Every structure is written in structure tokens, then in C-alpha cells.
Image: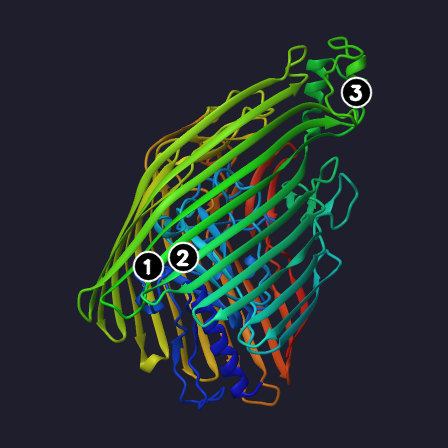
Amino acid sequence: MSSHLHVRKLTRAIRVSCCLGLIASAPVWAQDASTAPGDPAKTLDTIVVTAGKLKESVREIAGSVSAVTDQQLQDIGAQSLADYIQRTPGVVFNNYQPGVSHVVMRGIATSSGNVQGQPTTGYFLNEVPLTEPGWTIAIPDIDAFDLNRVEVLRGPQGTLFGSASMGGAINYVANVADSSGFDAAAEATVSQTRNADVGYSAKAMVNLPIKEDLLAVRAVAQYRDAPGFLDNIGTGKQGSNSSTVEGGRLSVVLTPSQSTTLTWLSLLQNTDSDDNSYRIVGLGDLERKTALPEFTNTKVAVHSLRLDQDLGFADLTALLSYQKKQQDWRFDYTPVRGAYNADLGLDLTAPLYIASGGESRGKSIELRLSSKPGGRIDWLVGGMYFDSDKVLYEKLGAQGAAGAFDRSPLYGPGSGAVIAPDGEVFNGFGTQLSGSEAALFGEASAHLNEQWKLTVGGRLFRNKVRTTTTQQGFSTYPRAPIVSTQQTKEDGFNPKVSLTWQATEDVMVYGLVSEGFRFGEPNTAGLSTYPVPSGSKSDSLINYELGTRTRWAGGRLLLDATLFYVDWKDIQLRLQTPDFFNYASNGGKAYSRGVEFAATWRPVDAFEWQASATWQHARLDEDLLILYYGTAPAGSQLPGSADWTVSNLLTYRFDARFDPTLSLSHQYVGGGISDLNSAVPGVTPNRQGNYNLFDLRYRMTFGNTDVSLFGSNLTDKRGITRSVTETNGIGEGLVRPRTYGVTVHWRY
């Protein structure tokens, strides 16, 4: 690629990012028309766009912000969130399978898996929320292809981003249509994982300028096939945990005038997993055992329309969105079949299963007005409303259930205990849930002088969740179905205050106090035989941090460090009954304190080293009684966290034909637990973490085509990313075994 074309595309990307009004920053080589790649005149710097929904340099943000740029995603061969998110400070990725894996920031979580209420990390696509009020059915794992960058905001983001961002937020920034010129790209990957078939992915993008400076369309299509590496000896299926991810994005940008931009963005993603990705402890190295495959199918559609209007004195942004999600999964319940046969007088012989899932539809609107940059006071005011409706289900069944109940001495023919037309489901639980969040928010920054800046902000919010549940089947027979209704309403205010000191051009220090919150959630009794609490109420936390951003060696070395302390009260708990059903509750206090460190060093043009390290101590602050299990003592580690995480990425660019580049990456994740039950003395703990991963990548460029050879998890480490207690035993989610492959990336 010529330097002129590179600059044109870089400028275009920055212009699009500024229109989006998002936070972005990542170490890159600053480049202008007079400095071609490899020019020693270049220095390490940052792309600057906007921050906190106000336009400002990321090196001046009073908060912990990281970003992974499109080029960095390509350099490490990123396909999904698992490939890059854990390289940022303060982050642990509890990887399981697409759509149901979770990011934990600063240790703020009570489970490493699906929580009963809102998650503690917020997810956004070009500022469109991907988590809805109440329990989130699924969170799409956005493919890294044709992303402009991925922003990681650590610490509570409740002031500007709302609920479900107590620990932090992840904002995917996708490229949108550009009317300045035609663009296209394509990528294909073929890989081989130990104990798995050959995997592949194919992706393509095309950008069509319908009319220059007026209208453009951009379309992205993606397909990934990840063959399974676990053998299910119960079903006889080798590579049973295979999965596919397919979908794409479509954007249309209309610019009728220099002051008006309309942007349409759609995301479609379907994820099909043939079986659970847990190996079962006590079996072979890569084996699991169930009586039937435990599949998960997820469908996500997100559509948004954005208006950016220059009003002269300020910028107006209006953002409308609609999302639809659906998820269905099945869980093998066969090990407890004998108890049902004995208690109900049944003679079931077919596998017993629980089918669960649901569908949600959500609509959101956000309006905000922000000042022009460069004034003595920068300000932003806005309002938002998010409304969500869900239908959830939980069904217990087995083939031949109708006949078994007809033969049962307790029920007999025509008892009506079997409630599904297929004659299989004999107990069911359905929930209709509606939730809404309304908020007014604002933030203002006063530049006291050239060195000092004071920022004050807040969010006034009101939340409401209402559930109507229906239970029917053998548990209510011969009575009519049981219908119950619950509702929670909450309101509050989230403040934020920060002070920034620009000591020198190369040294910035800030202090920050911010607060985060999330919805409370009514419980549904479900199919558990154990009573559970009525639900959970909203919890909140206060985050205190002191950070610095520094620049050394003429800009060739960037060093950032942050000290933080988080005080968490009335924490929402995700707990499990002895018969393996989840429920939500509140209890106790917790804290997290730690240090985050990030560095980027390029001593010479050919070599670059990016590193991050985090030490954190996320613990219960007082004893916590866990129903049916016992007491987790004060000082117990919070689930989904790790005391230490370390990441290194070393890149060397050879001065040779075809611009060969060699990259070596390393990640370390310290040990932890996956749920709070594991903190109770005497309970067999579900452990995770305590592993190192090493990846190697070699890339060569042939004109407009890059060819990369890669190897991931080179030592074939069985890193445990999450553990659960199942009816079949302890299940362990694993890092993908050693994988080799080749990627071909072509760009116009």
C-alpha cells in the first residue's frame, strides 16, 4: 500500500470515529504524508479522537481506558473476543462459548458465568447497548474483522453508559460506510486444532460510494467454523463441542449536508454450538460424558439509526435502536432420573433433559447535546430510555413421558401431567418479563488553567422490572397452573468527580471517584424443589482511583499506571440450589483493590513491546451466608477474578522483501474460583485460571495481500477458563488446545 493511500484511509477512519463520538486510543506510529512506514522520524504516539462522549485527547482522560485498533487486531490474528480482550489491564475473560462468555473487570462479579440478573460489564456496538434491562439472554461476540477498534473502559461507567457497567464497559467500534471511495477486503483462515477436524473461516467486506460526499453502503459477511475438540463418550460423538458463527453487518451513511449525518447500522449473528464445551473431571484428557448432546443456539439482531447534527453552538446526537435475541439450550438431567421414577412412580428409560431459553425484544433511545471542543468548559447533557420485553421458558422432559405417566399408579391415564403436544414435557415454567430504564445524565469539565481540569457528572435514573410466571405440569397437578406476579422499582443518582493535573507535556496525573449500579431482579421459583428468595434488589459500588499517563524517550515509550479501590455493598449474588438451578439474592459487602500497569516501547523502528500487568485483591468484606451450602468467610476471593494477570506482545518487523513480521505473545492468568459456593469450607471448589499461554505469528505482505502463519497455545496448556457443578460431575471449560493455521488477508 502506498503511503498516500495509507494516510487517506487513516484520515478517513479518524473522521468516521470523530462522527461517532466515542473513546479511542491505542499506541500506533504517528504518520503523515512525509513519513512512510519504517521512517525513523516517526515516534510512538496515539490516535486521538474523542472521549467520554466529548471530544478530547485520550491521553487527557481521567479514567482507565484502553483500546485495540484494527491493525493490532490483524497483527495478533484476532477472530473473537477471546483473542484480545484479556491483553488489556484489569480484565479476566471467563471463556466458554460465543454468546455466553463473560468479561470480568477489576474482579467485580459473583459468578464467572451467566448471572441471574444483569452482568457487571456493559457491552456496546457503536454506543448501542447490547445488554438490556433485567437478565440478558445473550451477548454477541462481535467478530474482529473490519472493526475500527475495541474500547475497554475499566471501572464503573454508570454516569454516561448506565446500568450493567459496574465493573466497566466494552464498546465495539465498527467501521461504517464511507462515500469518499470504493473499498473492499477479504480474509480466509484454515486451522488445525489438536483432537479436532480442520476449522476454517471466511469473511468479506465491500464499501460502495453511491454518491460522493452524500451516500454510501458498507456490507460485511462472516462465517466461522470451530470444530469440537472434546469427545462425548456418552453420545459417542467425537469433537462434540463444535460450533459455528455466521452473520454480518450493514451500514448506510447519508450526509445531506456538512452539518448533518445519518447512519444506519445493523448486526446479525447466529451461533450454533452442538454440545457443551465442558470436559468432565475424572474422564480422559479431552472427554465429557452425557446421555444426550447439550446444545446451545443463539440468534441476535441489532438495528440502529443515528443522527449527528452540528447546531453551531453545540453538537446534537440522537440514537435509536432495536434488538431481538433468542437463545435455546438443553441440559442433561439424566443422573437424577431415578429420583423422579421413585417419587412419581414412573418407569422412564429415555434420557431426562431440561430445555431452557427465551426471546427478548428491546427498544432504546438516547438524545444528547455536547459542547464544541476548545472552550473553557466542556459539557454534555442527555437523556435515554430503554424498554425490554422477554419470554423465558424452562421445561423438564423425556421421550416416552406420556406413556410413563399413564402407567404411573400416582397419576394414571389422561392425568394431564404431560403438558406438551410431543408427549415429552411433564413440568414447565414460563416467565414474561418487562423491564425499563429511564435516565437523565450530564457531565461538565472546567479547565481551571493550562494544567488543571475539574470534571463533575451524574446520572439520575429510574428502573422497573415486572415478571409474570406460570408453572404447570406434575408439580401442580391436579390443580390449575400457578400464576404469580412480581415487580421491583428503583431510582437513584450516580455521581462522578475527577481532577486532572497536566504536570508537563509528557506527564498527566488524575484522581477519580465514580459510582456504578445495576438492576435488581425478581426470582422465579423455576423447577427447583428448593425454595428460593423472592429476588434481588439493586446493588451499587463506589470506585476510587489514582492514575498517571506518561511519555518518555521522545515519545518512544508510553507508561501508564492506575491504583484503584472499589467498595461494593449489597452485592447481587448468583447462587445455585442443590438440584442445580440458579437464583439471585443479595448479601454482604465486598471490595477490590489493585494496581494496573500498561507500557508500549519501541526503542527502534523494527521492534515493539506491548505489556500489561495487573495485581488485584477482590474479596468478600464480611462473612456471607449461602443458602443450602454454608458460610463463605470474609476474605474469600470473588468468582471470575484473578489476583494476577500479565500480557506481553513482542513484534519485530524485518527490513527485507515482503515486509516479514514476527510476533510472539504471552498471557498469564492467576488462579481463582468460578462461583461463590466454592468459597464455602467443605464444598468442592470450582477452580479456574493459573495458566500461561504462548502464541506465535509470522506475516508476509505480497502487494495487497498478507499471508500469516500462526500457532496458538503452543505448549498445549489445559487452561481452565470456568468450572461448573453439573449433574454429570464437575465441568471445566478449557482454553482451545494447540492450534496451527494460515490466514490470508486481502485488501483493495
Separation of marks 3 and 1 at Cα, in angstroms? 60 Å
Pointer 2 local density, CA inside 10 Å: few below 14, some 14–19, many at least 20: many
| Residue 408 in view | yes
Say which amino acid is labelled 3.
Answer: Ala
- Please tell me the numbered disc located at residue 153: 2
> Which quarter of the picture shows residue 586?
top left
Lower sequence index among marks 1 and 2:
1
- Residue 8 lies, with reference to residue 269, above or below; the image says below
Say which amino acid is labelled 1.
Answer: Gly
Lower sequence index among marks 2 and 3:
2
Outermost residue on the top side: it is: 409
- Please tell me the numbered disc located at residue 402: 3
Q: Position of residue 263 (x, y in %)?
A: 52, 62
Q: Residue at x 58, y 52 (%)?
A: 302
Residue 177 horizontal side relative to residue 353, left or right: left
Q: How is the image coloured?
A: rainbow
Q: Residue at x 60, y 34 (%)?
A: 391
Which sits in the foreground, 191 or 155?
Answer: 155
Residue 188 horizontal side relative to residue 440, left or right: right
| Marks 1 & 2, CB-CB < 8 Å contact | yes
Say which amino acid is labelled 2.
Answer: Leu
**Residue that carries the numbered disc 1 in the rendered image:** 63
Separation of marks 2 and 3 at Cα, in angstroms? 53 Å
- Residue 107 lies, with reference to residue 645, above or below; the image says above
